[in-house]
Image (cartoon, rainbow, N blue to C red):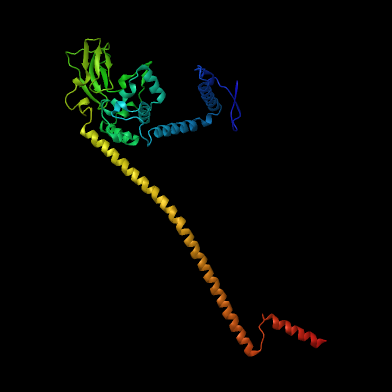
Amino acid sequence: MALQNSGSIGATESCALSLKVPKLKLSGNSMKDIQMQHERDSLIDCINILWKFPDIRSECVGYLKMAVGEKRQSALGDEYFEQEVTTVGKLDEQWCVDYICNKTQWTPAALGEAKVLDHTIVPCIMEFLLGANKTLRLSAACKRKLVCMKALNARCAAVNNRVDLLADEELIKGGQLNWLVFCYEPQFHNGSDLVTHIRHRPTGQVAEMPFDVEIDRTFDVVCNHHDLLASFRKGKHHEYKCHEFFEKDVGPHAHKHWNGMPREWDIMINSALGQQEVTDQTQAAANNAGSASSSAEAFISPLKQMQRDRLQLARRKMIENQEAGSQKKRKSSLEGTGETHPWDMNAVLQGVDLVEEGEH
């Protein structure tokens, strides 16, 4: 099968890789099926073109990354949430996905796969990034997306930018969610099955396990996105909270885990609102200056033209007056001597006539 491509590329044969693109499962909605078929054909086109022209692959990858980045940023853009936002857990999920993807290397597709495995993954990641419960309250100012984003960024910075921990991590490993990329990491000594230490990843601080507590590889680490709820669990009767192994002001206790509306959080939101108002005023001033400049130019240009016209007219009149005065002066001087001026054509022609009459 050959695919027709526009421009100078012409017909491009299908490569083996494009043949692996799965066939569509018809939904029964003809319009949707046509659109999906068109998207599939476009994907196959891209694969075949990049396969045939390897020298453009790097440029294409760069363009795609830039386009995806712009799309994510526009999704976080200067609009207002349609629904009322009262807590972090009530934020629009798609906006949260864009926020997470804008800060990490994860893609919306990866988060979509993760959500199939655990439908709570998006709010869990938000709780981890903020070091707060999803019940952390949002004021009315956060209905504007840019204000909300600035406030969330401020909180992320306050808890040591936990997003940096996710930069090179895979969210899904072996078909399962990789919860160990978040708060706590159990450490084993020399390949032993017993946990000897536990590391709090956001702070990098390590706690030693008590001798009377035996936690082995049969335990699961649950709720590992949450500093205070994460625990080692085995069955229904064996559970140890991870944060309890750390001393005061160490590891998970270095920053207070937020809930409700802490005073510091209210200050962050108001600061974000203030910053956005300054940005708005600066942008408005720039727009007004541009508009005023255009209006001034539109007003001043005709005045300048009028001044130029008047100046040219005055110059012409001055030159005409000077020429008239010079001619009058030359004429009066010639009349007194009886001589003709070389440029007095009437006198010259009269002289010619007299010469001709004398010759006859």
Q: Is residue 182 left or right of residue 250?
A: right
177 or 295: which is nearer to us? 295
Q: Position of residue 88 (x, y in %)?
A: 29, 28
Q: Position of residue 161 (x, y in %)?
A: 29, 31
From this view, report whether residue 114 is shown above or below residue 160: above
Q: Position of residue 193 (x, y in %)?
A: 26, 12
The quarter in which the C terminus is drawn is bottom right
The quarter in which the N terminus is drawn is top right
78 or 107: which is nearer to us? 78
- How many numbered marks, from 0 up? 0
Q: Is residue 192 left or right of residue 26?
A: left
Residue shown at 58% from the left, 78% from the top: 324
From this view, report whether residue 344 is shown above or below residue 117: below
From this view, report whether residue 359 is shown above or below residue 104: below
Q: Is residue 351 left or right of residue 239?
A: right
338 or 92: which is nearer to us? 92
Q: Residue furthest bottom?
A: 337
Q: Position of residue 23 (x, y in %)?
A: 52, 17
54 or 60: which is nearer to us? 60
